[in-house]
């Protein structure tokens, strides 16, 4: 994976010296960056077209496409049809993944700690302050938890990963919904902020007794210890391709609403509760640019599924890919 990312970054760095038309510029969500990087690396090898993608967070991606400074924006927080009309944008999903909780507690192994929505909510509200709190111990009777203060790590930038995570907390915890709410940026009651999924991963890796939330590929890449999480069916599930796919299987994306949909707390025995899609945003008036962007994503839909799976992302179902291609055709932006 590091080799793939290095190759992508090299392509991005030299993109500014390439012949015009051979470069597609995008910016936004850090959530899908590992898979977009891998796709772009392979696409460049096969076509010579460079994808210069800045992993700056969903808020930055929305801002840049609104300002028309990139060819496409990327956001894990879908825009409502009303906002898309206001900003004159198209929107469609490109990949599905999972947001996971990661911890750095000495003696606790990956996949060992069990948490539920209410406990996570009150950790991030600052009500549960120590790892040996009775609510955590009740879920983990077989683990010896230390009397150490919990160090909460969250995103400092406008983030689609945060939007997915806070939408999940709002759906499972009235206290969170009433006191903090959901969005790409919220007023965090406690904790320290890291920029991007990378920043949160690095903080959790360095800080003992910490907890944070990241897209699963960042947890794998940084060898962070993920937790189990109780889903809407009442089962403690492991973050994995299978549990992310189980969440995605119930999603009903509507092209008439520009595919606007949240996927948190999906039904299903095996569904991971903090799953989400990452979306591509295009300026409606940029017909020829949009065709170039969509040529890349059409290539990824045809050739990128195995790459996505290796990085523990869920490729879009073929039925949804077909809906997206019809959406492109309807708006005259088919590649």
Image: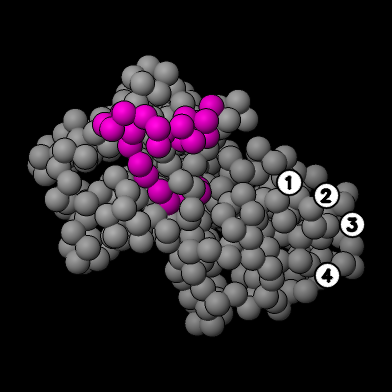
Camera-side residue of 119 and 315: 315
Residue 244 versus residue 254 in the image, above or below:
above
Is residue 14 visible in the rendered structure shown here? Answer: yes
Few, some or many C-alpha atoms within 10 Å of disc 2 (few <14, some 14-19, many ≥20)? some
Q: Residue 142 location, x and y as percent?
A: 85, 53
Q: CA distance from mark 1 to mark 2?
A: 8 Å
Is residue 229 depicted above or below 86 in this figure?
Answer: above
Is disc 3 placed on a helix, strand or loop? loop
Element assignment for label 1: strand
Q: Are marks 4 and 1 in contact (CB under 8 Å)?
A: no
Residue 307 included in the magenta stretch of the image:
no
Which callout, 4 or 2, points at the residue further toward the start of the chain? 2
For label 2, the residue is 108
Assign a secondary structure to mark 2.
Answer: loop
Counting residues from the N terminus, which is met first, the one under dot 1 or under dot 2? Answer: 2
Q: Position of residue 77 (x, y in %)?
A: 39, 58
Magenta-colored span: 7-31
Q: CA distance from mark 3 to mark 4?
A: 15 Å
* Image point (25%, 49%), residue name: 282
Location of mark 4 (residue) = 149
Marks 1 & 2, CB-CB < 8 Å contact: yes
Residue 192 position within the rendered picture, expressed as x and y whole percent measured from the top left? 68, 68
Q: Which mark is residue 144?
A: 3
Query: Is residue 24 in the magenta section?
Result: yes
The residue lying toward the viewer, choosing from 196 and 303, is 196
């Amino acid at each position: 994976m590091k080799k793939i990312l290095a190759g992508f970054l090299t392509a991005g760095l030299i993109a500014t010296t390439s012949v015009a038309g051979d470069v597609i510029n995008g910016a936004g969500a850090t959530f899908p960056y590992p898979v977009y990087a891998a796709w772009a690396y392979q696409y460049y090898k096969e076509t010579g077209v460079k994808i210069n993608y800045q992993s700056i967070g969903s808020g930055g991606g929305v801002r840049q496409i609104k300002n028309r400074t990139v060819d496409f924006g990327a956001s894990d927080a879908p825009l409502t049809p009303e906002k898309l009309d206001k900003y004159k944008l198209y929107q469609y999903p490109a990949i599905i993944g999972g947001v996971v909780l990661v911890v750095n507690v000495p003696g606790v192994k990956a996949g060992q700690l069990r948490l539920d929505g209410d406990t996570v909510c009150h950790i991030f509200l600052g009500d549960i302050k120590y790892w040996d709190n009775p609510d955590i111990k009740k879920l983990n009777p077989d683990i010896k938890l230390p009397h150490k203060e919990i160090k909460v790590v969250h995103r400092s930038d406008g983030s689609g990963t945060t939007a997915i995570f806070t939408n999940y907390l709002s759906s499972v915890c009235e206290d969170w919904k009433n006191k903090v709410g959901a969005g790409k940026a919220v007023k965090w009651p406690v904790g320290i902020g890291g920029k991007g999924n990378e920043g949160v991963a690095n903080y959790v890796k360095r800080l003992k007794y910490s907890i944070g939330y990241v897209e699963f590929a960042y947890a794998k890449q940084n060898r962070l210890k993920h937790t189990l999480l109780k889903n809407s069916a009442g089962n403690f599930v492991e973050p994995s391709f299978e549990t992310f796919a189980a969440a995605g299987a119930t999603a009903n994306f509507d092209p008439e609403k520009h595919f606007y949909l949240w996927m948190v707390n999906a039904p299903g025995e095996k569904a991971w509760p903090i799953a989400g899609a990452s979306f591509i945003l295009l300026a409606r008036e940029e017909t020829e640019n949009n065709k170039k962007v969509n040529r890349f994503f059409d290539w990824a839909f045809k050739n990128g599924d195995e790459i996505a799976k290796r990085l523990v992302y869920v490729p879009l179902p073929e039925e949804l890919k077909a809906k997206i291609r019809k959406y492109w055709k309807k708006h005259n932006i088919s590649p």
